[in-house]
Image: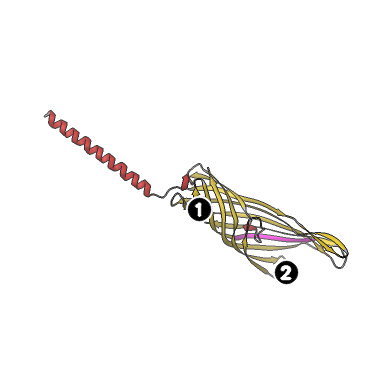
Amino acid sequence: MIRRISSMTAGIAVSLAATGAFAQQASAEATATMPAAAGGGFGRSGQLALSVDRLFGFAHSSTKEEPDVPNPATTTTTATEFSLIGRLPVSAYQVPRLGVDYFLADNISVGGSITFFTVSSEAKIESAAGSATTDLPTVTTFLIAPRVGYALMFSDMFGIWPRGGITFFSRKVSQQNFNAGTGGTTEQTDSVNGFSLTVEVPFIISPVEHIGITIAPTLDFPITGSGSREETGQPTVDSTVKTTDFGISAGLLTWF
């Protein structure tokens, strides 16, 4: 009887061990087939991601301007450009920016991007009468864009990080105009600012752990915007300005 019980006990123990080993193997296989949170752990709760967005890429923008006067003449300006690092883009939305995002939970991020960009230059004209120096337009751009996102990596190297939010931008262009009537110059300042809904869908390529390259289709759709022109001796002209911008841009990404 004792021998029979011992045999039964040994059989049960072997069965339980085999069942446990099978369960562990099945769990490991299931985990292996699930999408990773992100390559190198990207997208996990508590992580901080730093990025440089819209370093360069292709963009198309359309700006509609309507002066705040009776019977206004509406002007629509379109621009298609390939912007490079260090080159001031036509569209304020395509200026390179620094991004900071924090993952509140696995895959879910909150953060934003910000930029400040100013360019000033001058031209020197030499002729038989002598040389003269004139200031070229000074362009100043400020932009801030809070956002939320959802990061999902399909492997250690490839993933996607859709993000959406609101963008505010302000751009000012100051220049001197020659007045043929007086022989002097006048100061002219054109200002424009606006809010837009922004959607970005960066594709992430991570050849090295904790470092990635982003390639992102982008869309900035206007909510509201305004502009003004101020010139010495002239009344200020206000206007409603709305810019729609879409394109595809590249950037860099790291996370901790």
Q: Observer-nearest residue: 235 or 32?
A: 32
Can I make out residue 232 in this image? no
Residue 25 x/y as whole percent? 31, 43
Residue at 48% from the left image edge and 43% from the top image edge: 45
Q: Residues within 10 Å of mark 1 (few under 14, many from 20)?
A: many
Q: Residue 202: x, y in percent?
A: 52, 55
Q: Quadrant of residue 13?
A: top left
Instruction: Report the residue that reaches farthest toward the top.
Output: 2
What residue is shown at x 71% (from left), y 53% (from top)? 118
Residue 109 drawn above or below residue 67: above
The numbered mark at residue 70 is 2
Question: Does residue 230 appear to the left or right of 15 in the view shown?
Answer: right
- Relative side of 27 to 62, left or right: left
Q: Point out residue 160 in the picture as x, y percentages from the top left corner.
A: 48, 54
Mark 1 vs 2, N-terminal side: 2
* Image-based side of 146 in relation to 241, left or right: left
The residue located at (87%, 68%) in the rendering is 181
Looking at the image, residue 205 lies above or below residue 9: below
Above or below for 240 versus 17: below
> Does the image show residue 226?
yes
Crowd band around label 2 with a 10 angstrom C-alpha radius: few (<14), some (14–19), many (20+)? few
The x, y position of residue 116, in whole percent, is 67, 51
Amino acid type shown at disc 2: Pro
Q: Which residues are magenta?
A: 221-234
Label 1 amino acid? Ile
Which secondary structure, mark 1? Answer: strand
User: Could you say whether the residue bearing mark 2 is in a helix, strand or loop?
Assistant: loop
Residue at image mark 1:
204
